[in-house]
Amino acid sequence: MLGEELKFIRKNLGMSQQAFAEHTGIPQGTIANIEKGAVKYPRVDVLLKLMELGYSADYLLLGEKGHISTEEILKNLPEEKLEVYKLLEKALIGDNSAIDGLIILLKTLKAKK
């Protein structure tokens, strides 16, 4: 399924395998192997690069039945969880103020329980 989904995404973007490789940073050989079905479960770094395009892991690995875009997931998150997500995203890139904010927010959420 992953191969079909990847090929669909790539063709939908109007890109060759080489152009898609350059766009995503995924080696062209890896893309070819996934598309021809030689790879059913990619390395985590490859999956994360594909998810950065806005596709959920469910969609990529399960196909249309499991498709929920990252944007859709975030849209439906309660405000508190969305705030945690945003802070975590910033913290992962080393934003110290986000790390401090995340700690404070988590303590506040814990105190509410």
Image: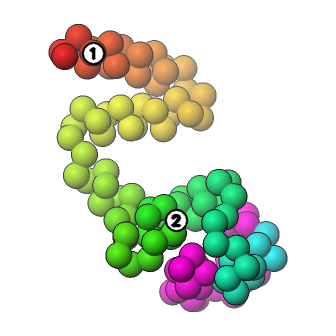
Q: Is residue 93 above or below residue 22?
A: above
Q: Is residue 10 visible?
A: no
- In magenta, the rendered stretch is 1-26
C-alpha distance separating marks 2 and 1? 33 Å
Which of 83 and 5 lies nearest the eye of the viewer?
Answer: 5
- Under mark 2, the amino acid is Leu
Residue depicted at x 81% and y 76%: 29
Q: Is residue 88 visible?
A: yes
Closer to the N terminus: mark 2 or mark 1? Answer: 2
- Residue 55 got which mark? none
Residue depicted at x 38% and y 38%: 85
Taking the image as shown, residue 99 lies to the left or right of residue 104, namely right
Q: Is residue 3 magenta?
A: yes
Q: Is residue 87 magenta?
A: no
Residue depicted at x 39% and y 58%: 70
Q: Which residue is mark 2?
A: 53
Badge 1 element: helix
Which of 93 and 47 lies nearest the eye of the viewer?
Answer: 47
Q: From the image, which quarter does the N terminus lie in? A: bottom right
